[in-house]
Amino acid sequence: MEAVFMFFCTLLVWLMTPGIALFYGGMVSRKNVLSTAMYSFSSMAIISILWVVVGYSLAFAPGNAFIGSFDWTFLHSVGFDANATYSDAIPHILFMMFQMTFAILTVAIISGAFAERMNFAAYLIFIILWSLLVYSPVAHWVWGEGGWLRELGALDFAGGNVVHISSGITGLVLAIVLGRRKEAENSSPHNLPLALIGGILVWFGWYGFNVGSALTIDNVAMAAFVNTNSAAAAGIVGWVAVEWMINKKPTMLGTISGAIAGLVSITPAAGFVTVGSALLIGFLGGAICFWAVFWLKGKLKYDDALDAFGLHGIGGIWGGIATGLFATTKINKLGADGLFYGNASLLGKQLIAIGSTVVFVAIATIIIIYVIKIFIPIRVDEDQEYKGLDLTLHGEKAYHE
């Protein structure tokens, strides 16, 4: 039963990356829709191979507090039998595949920050190095056997730190290093229905993302299921309420962005909080992410093209803090009580986890991108940017009038 459940959840999370391709593709200009989708689909190819060769071993094989080992390289000793360290109910190789979909999605999320201006060859080199040197270590810290944040007692149910903070911070660093798009001030989504379809697929897949992180069908999984939907709905209300007050109109793009903000915010807390807390986390997540996208980005003048940092980085940070506030052992006895349930220490552990992730990811990303920059341009030239990356980098057009 558990194996069938996890197989289905794995497929749901896999669907999120094509969803991101459509969501991001609809939000860029028509001359860059295919190149933007290529970022996501190339992550599915590259990271799938990298994960089974060595990525999974570095993230989850027994090692030290900071990184796994090469014991499971090429999936050595990863078979149908369960590994009790992670789950005694599902095949170890199925757990590996479930985690692979997370690694793929994280890389795809990053691409939203530098859309319409990053050299595709540099991107491919970057995701290989980043997945090995950043994602795998952070995943080991939080979820791996002996990982130091796991041993500390920090909570991350489904990837607030591992997926969203790491991708959001990486996206911010890349957006700053690459600089602003030449047409950033005049950019607008070329196909909102396409973005809407992508956003719906992402929301649908998120049930596998959060609920599947329970690794079985039990009361915690059902709590995560209800909390995921509730936070997404509340995120819409939070985002659109602020948008309506400030911009005087509720928008469709704001609605789906609010849902994603709520989903990101609840991700680290999904299996640890009550539904009332989930509603509050999602509502505030929508409002906070709106602030990041429409005020913070404008104030600091970084060009986070599709708001990878505004949605995933800021939403993930808020979700990690909220876990430290609202977590309760009444929902998950394997978790911990948060500040509002009499345990201030959990909030401290969450802040340590968030801070260490932000610092490590930012520094490692800067090093990786500047090393690549020595050998290959990381940004396309002005003529390529003006004509669009679909034609100049990939030799094709999305639309032929």
Image (cartoon, grey):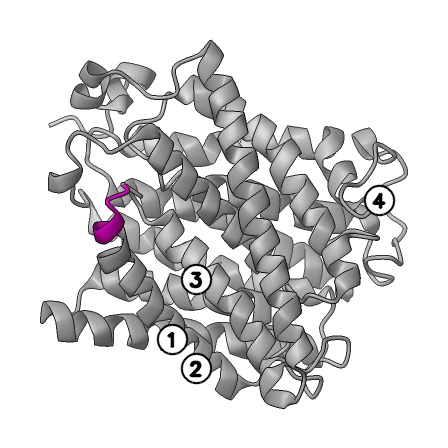
Asked if labels 2 and 1 touch by Cβ distance under 8 angstroms, the answer is yes
Give the amino acid at mark 1.
Leu
How many residues crowd mark 2 within 10 Å: few (<14), some (14–19), many (20+)?
many
Secondary structure of residue under mark 4: loop
Q: Which residue in the structure is indicated by mark 2?
A: 280
Q: Nearer the viewer, residue 71 or 17?
A: 71
Asked if labels 1 and 4 touch by Cβ distance under 8 angstroms, the answer is no
Q: Which mark is residue 284?
A: 1
Q: Report the Cα–Cα distance between label 1 and label 3.
A: 9 Å
Give the amino acid at mark 3.
Gly
Q: Is residue 261 above or below residue 143?
A: below
Q: Which mark is residue 64?
A: 4
Asked if labels 3 and 1 touch by Cβ distance under 8 angstroms, the answer is no
Q: Earlier in the sequence, mark 4 or mark 3?
A: 4
Secondary structure of residue under mark 2: helix
Spot occupied by residue 310 in the image (x, y as percentages of width and height)? 35, 54
Q: Which residue in the structure is indicated by mark 3?
A: 315
Magenta span has 336? no
Classify the position of the C terminus by image quarter: top left
